Image (tube, coloured by chain):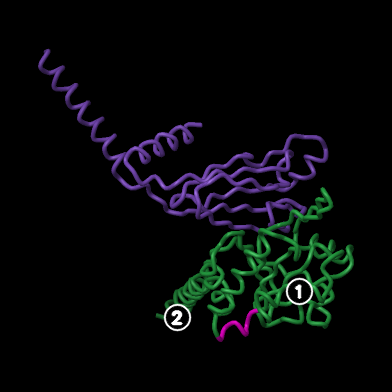
Amino acid sequence: MSALFGTVLPALLLAASVAAHAAGAPSLMAGTFDPPRAAPDFTLEGSDGKPLSLSRFRGKVVVLQFGFTSCVNVCPATLATLAQVHRALGEQASGVQVVYITVDPERDDADRLSRYLAAFDAGFIGGTGTEKALADVRKAYGVAAQRNASAGSVQYGHSSFVTLIDGQGRLRALMPYGYGPEAYVHDIRALLSQ
Amino acid sequence: MTRRLIAASAVVLVASMSGVLAAALVPVPSVTRDQIHEIPAGTWARRMAGEPATPFPERIRLVLGVNDVLVLRNQDDVPHQFGPALMMPGQSFRLPFTTASEFQFACTAHASGQMVIVVDPHPDTPWARLRWRAQRALELRG
C-alpha cells in the first residue's frame, strides 16, 4: 500500500501534470517555434512620439510587421486584416499591440507612419530609425528587405510574414501572408489565454 | 487439373481486385501530420569545409490532411534561416500548410540556399487514394 503512495501515485501525478501541460500548449495556425526564444528587443523612434521598444509592451501580445508605407500589395492588405482582427477581438484588443517597422527610413519618418497607420487603426504604432538601426532589427528577426529602384520609383521586396510575440516577450510564431482575420484571432486568443 | 487452375486464378484475381478496391476506398490514414526534417550538427561546418552537406531534400512533397505540417529541427551549431524563420541551434519551426500549391523558401541548410515545398491536395477520390498509396509504396521501397 505504501508502495502505491510512494512510487506509483507520484508517477501518475507527474504523468498527469505532463499531459495537462501538453494539453495546455495551444496549437496555433501560424508557424511556431519550439522552444520559443526571447524576441530581440530594439529601440526605435515611435510614430506616437515616444521611443519604441519591445519591452514597452510587456504583458501584451505584440503583432509585429515589417514594411513601408509606399507598399502597394503586402502592407495595406496585411494592415487591413490586422485592423479587422483588432475589431474582432473586442475588449481583448487592449491586450494586443500592432507594431509596424519600416524598411524605408528615407521616406517613412514618424509623422508619415503615424498618418499612414491611422488610416487602418489609431492604436497601431510605427517604428523608424537610422538605416543601420533598422537593418539590425531585421537581422535579429531574420527579416529580408531588398531595395529596388527603377524609373524613378523606389520599392522594397520584404518579408511578408507577421511575427507574433507573447506577453512574456517570447517570439512564438510567424503568420504567413494571406491568412485571414480568423487565423489571427484564433492565435492571438490562444496566446492571451496563457 | 484445369478446373483447379481456373479456380486458383479466380481466387488470386478476386484477392487482387479486393486489394485494389480497398486501396481506393479506404481513407488515407494519418497518425501524425508532422513531416519532420532535421539539420544535423556540423552541417554548416561541413559546407564551409567544401564537403557536400545536404541534410534533407531540397524539394519536399506534402499532402493536405495527411502530412501537411513541415517541422524543421535545427540541431546544427549555428542559426539557420528557413524562409522568414530564423531558427536558433536547438530550435524547431513547425509550419502547417493549408493550401495545395508550390512554395519556394530561402533555406540556409542547403548549398543552393533554396527549398521548394510542394503541397498536394488531399487524396479524397478513389483514383487519388490509389495514386497516393502507389507513390507511398515506391517511396518506402526507396
Q: Earlier in the sequence, mark 1 or mark 2?
A: 2
Q: In which quarter of the view is residue B54 placed?
A: top right
What is the span of residues highlighted in magenta in the rendered image? A91-96
Q: In which quarter of the view is residue A121 placed?
A: bottom right
Instruction: Name the amino acid type tagged 1.
Output: Gly
Q: Provide residue B85's location: percent of width, then percent of height.
A: 68, 57
Q: Which of B120 and A108 is in front in this view?
A: A108
Determine whether A124 is above or below B69 in the image: below
Q: Provide residue A48's location: percent of width, then percent of height.
A: 78, 82
Determine whether A69 is above or below A167 in the image: above
Q: In which quarter of the view is residue B114 placed?
A: top right
Instruction: Name the amino acid type tagged 2.
Output: Phe
| Colour displayed for chain B in the image of the structure | purple
| Label placed on residue A126 | 1
Q: Output the chain of dot 2.
A: A
Q: Is residue B133 left or right of residue A92?
A: left
